[in-house]
Amino acid sequence: MAMYKDKYRVETTRLPGWDYSSHGYYFVTICTKGHVHYFGDIVGGEMTLSDVGRVACDCWAAIPAHFPFAVVDESVVMPNHVHGIVIIPPHERASQSGKFGSQSRNLGSIIRGYKVGVKKGAIERGLMFDWQPRFYEHVIRSGESLGKIRNYIVTNPQRWETDEYNVGHRPLQRHL
């Protein structure tokens, strides 16, 4: 970790110099705060969604309705995280606002909107839920990599017992 203004800060995982509003395939992972299992449970290698898990799934599918410049590909909602592929197709750029174009039409704005949508849906239903700050992303740069990542996403529930995000097995404490 690096220091900034005498405080530790997490280094960025972003690809240096990459314009995240440009055409590309992006693999993202978004985690719940504290890796709490808000979204449901894995039973027999398959994901069983909780109410918040259904909200997360529905909001992912709705990304193109809110961000018409984006397309969603494979995705999976896991007990404490979401994996998915977001595609930003080739597009004409209106006016550039800064080195990397409009900041309302990039991967960060899509993920912020998604996280807000899930949080709002949970609040409206009176459900406990919170996101971890930030998200992980990986720019997919080849067809071979795309195929491997799609397979990783689809088979993620079968590998839950050894999944790196299955830390501490912290299921949501349900209040009766």
Image: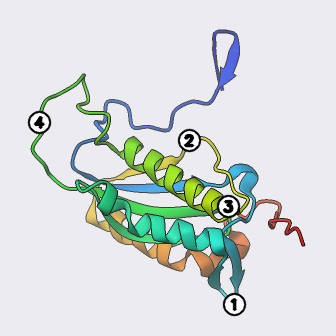
**Gap in angstroms between the C-alphas marked 2 and 3:** 17 Å
* Between discs 2 and 3, the one toward the N terminus: 2
The mark closer to the camera, 3 or 1, is 1
Residue 111: give x, y in percent of width and height. 44, 49
User: Which amino acid does the dot numbered 2 rest on?
Assistant: Arg
Give me the residue at 69% from left, 80% from top: 42
Image position of 12 with respect to 153: above or below: above
Quarter of the image holding residue 87?
A: bottom left
Q: SS of the residue at dot 4?
A: loop
* Between discs 3 and 1, the one toward the N terminus: 1
Circle 4 sits on which residue? Answer: 94
Circle 1 sits on which residue? Answer: 44
User: Which amino acid does the dot numbered 1 rest on?
Assistant: Gly
* Between discs 4 and 1, the one toward the N terminus: 1
* Badge 1 density bin: few <14, some 14–19, many ≥20, Cα 10 Å: few
Residue 55: give x, y in percent of width and height. 55, 68
* Badge 4 density bin: few <14, some 14–19, many ≥20, Cα 10 Å: few
Is residue 56 shown left or right of residue 79?
left
